Image (cartoon, grey):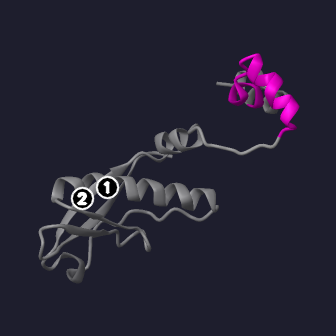
Amino acid sequence: MQNLTYFAVFEPTEDGSYSIYFPDLPGCISFGKNLEEAARLAAEAASLHVYSMECDHEEIPVPSNNLSKQDIEGNIVMPVTIHPDLFRMKKDNERIKTNITLPAWLKRLAEEQKVNYSRLLESALMEYLQIPLSRRQ
């Protein structure tokens, strides 16, 4: 997937912060304390929203070329470019915590040997799932 550029609508609030929404991405909203933070968080929100849609096998909306008068009136509109492939790679390779249970005696032996549980479990899972070496990172 190539880069996608969606219009973000920044609605100013009385305290100088901004609420953000994307007309092309229903349900994708964010908030920033100032315009700079809002712009950064808008890109993050849109990236996460598109990533979630991909994970749910939903069709990714095509970005619009224009907005309604209602979206523009009294608001700041900025194009926000996201990079779905890079974001997906980042999210898919994040390290996440997983709880496991072991017999106490086995845990003691492993700790005595300074076993790296994460590395061992990752290697064992890749071998068990028969993931080829070319796919291992």
Q: Residues within 10 Å of mark 1 (few under 14, many from 20)?
A: some
Quarter assignment of residue 30: bottom left
The spot of residue 87 in percent (x, y) is 47, 44
| Camera-side residue of 12 and 47 | 12
- Residue that lies at the very extreme toward the bottom in this rendered image: 70
- Label 1 sits on residue: 41
Amino acid type for the residue under numbered disc 2: Ala
Is residue 109 located in the magenta-colored stretch of the structure? yes
Q: Is residue 120 left or right of residue 50?
A: right
Q: Are marks 1 and 2 in contact (CB under 8 Å)?
A: yes
Q: Which residues are magenta?
A: 102-121
* Residue 130 visible in this rendered orientation of the protein: no
Q: Dot 2: what SS?
A: helix
Report x, y in % for residue 3: 41, 46
Q: Which residue is mark 2?
A: 38
Q: Residue placed at 12% from the left, 72% from the top?
A: 15
Q: Residue at x 17, y 67 (%)?
A: 17
Is 124 magenta? The answer is no
Left or right of 56? Residue 36 is left
Q: Residue 82 appears at what percent x and percent y?
A: 38, 49
Rendering quarter of residue 2? top left
In front of the other: 58 or 14: 14
Residue 42 at x, y percent in the picture:
32, 58
Q: Residue at x 80, y 30 (%)?
A: 107
Magenta segment's dominant SS is helix
